[in-house]
Image (cartoon, rainbow, N blue to C red):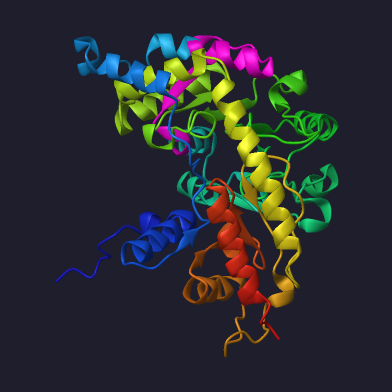
Amino acid sequence: MSTRPRVSARISAISESATLAVDAKAKAMKAAGRPVIGFGAGEPDFPTPGYIIEAAVQAAREPRFHKYTPAGGLPELKQAIADKTRRDSGYAVEASQVLVTNGGKQAVYEAFATLLDPGDEVLVVAPYWTTYPEAIKLAGGVQVDVVTDESTGYLASVEQLEAARTERTKVLLFVSPSNPTGAVYSREQTEAIGRWAAEHGLWVVTDEIYEHLVYGGAEFTSIATAVPELGDRVVILNGVAKTYAMTGWRVGWLIGPSDVVKAATNLQSHATSNVANVSQMAALAAVSGDLSAVAEMRAAFDRRRQTMVRMLNEIPGVFCPEPKGAFYAYPSVKELIGKELRGRRPQSSGELAELILEEAEVAVVPGEAFGTPGYFRLSYALGDDDLVEGVSRVAKLLSEAR
């Protein structure tokens, strides 16, 4: 009988998405009748705008969309994405430089699969979104963490990046606004980091999925536009999921130099072929329309952001910097680790998150999932009443810590 592993070592090494796992557990408990409030998934609680749905309905009726279409995306959608990119960030690209992908995650994977050879290093600012490490690993790359904390608002400096750079460094992953922290780099910080990357001949992969979700005095700055000297060493990742409340439609995109996009398109032609045509036509309506829908969502998120941060900072032992973008808060709970709480002494933020789920029936994602133990990520993309109730439950429980 064969003793070879049933599953390859490469795939066995992939970790389950912690955010989706927490969300699934919360939903399962809720289905079992428990009043669980989930702060896990990064998903707007708004419906997809009606004009986008109507575009999908119309597309479903057209026979041409019942067939295969080009693997890299519908030509009209690629052109619309190029136009939208120029409109929103001032970055000029041709339609041929756009690859339409099955959600933002496929764009992340294909970017690293196309750029990296085994042993190439990628600088990743921690805390980081849970999918980045797995995509880098699958591509044979080596992740090099640049760890930040609440003292700097989770922003990395050029000095930190330079200290992590080696002769094997090929790519800088730049994410602003950030998931999980909500950190947003200023134009000056973005320009400094971009110039540093250009000086050392690094590629920059920049995830701009939260570009329209910034608050207060913060502004989104595309590193591709801010630092023209990066030239053709920039790959932009984006999608419709967050801006247009379209997480389930699964449409993202990758923008880059023609040779990279052509190679990534070849990969996609064998992996999945074209994105579902109905979803592509919905995305076309989204990116071609105005931004009034996201303006309404942003106002709600801003209100919830302020409420959540205020309530979290009122809990003894919790400190939460004000997030400037996305829809997440990332409080430090390091002072609570090891304290007695309902007969237990959680020794990690992961154990503390489990205790909160069991005792307060509130789901949060522990910092271990994002490369920085001692923290929680809470999404404020949920209703105002649930947000207040959920944080109140957490506060009541954690007030018992001794």
Task: Using the rendered view, name the quadrant where residue 338 is placed.
Answer: bottom right
- Viewport quadrant of the C terminus: bottom right
Q: Name the one closer to the observer, 248 or 350.
A: 248
Magenta span: chief secondary structure = helix
The relative height of residue 140 versus residue 223 in the rendered view (above or below) is below
The relative height of residue 37 versus residue 58 in the rendered view (above or below) is below
Provide residue 395's location: percent of width, then percent of height. Answer: 65, 69
**Residue 57 falls left or right of residue 213:** left
The answer to whether residue 235 of the structure is visible from this angle is no
The answer to whether residue 32 of the structure is visible from this angle is yes
The relative height of residue 7 versus residue 73 in the rendered view (above or below) is below
Q: Is residue 398 magenta?
A: no
Q: Is residue 88 magenta?
A: yes
**Residue 356 falls left or right of residue 57:** right
**Residue 196 falls left or right of residue 292:** right
Hey, which residue is sitting farthest front in the picture?
A: 385
Provide residue 146's location: percent of width, then percent of height. Answer: 72, 52
Q: Residue at x 78, y 32 (%)?
A: 190
Task: Using the rendered view, name the quadrant where residue 53 is placed.
Answer: top left
Magenta part of the protein: which range? Answer: 80-105
Query: Total marks drawn?
Result: 0
Hey, which residue is sitting farthest bottom in the picture?
A: 343
Q: Name the one closer to the observer, 189 or 352.
A: 352
Q: Name the one closer to the observer, 52 or 11.
A: 52
Task: Using the rendered view, name the quadrant where residue 394 is placed.
Answer: bottom right
Provide residue 2's location: percent of width, then percent of height. Answer: 18, 68
- Viewport quadrant of the N terminus: bottom left
**Residue 83 falls left or right of residue 188:** left
Provide residue 82's location: percent of width, then percent of height. Answer: 54, 13
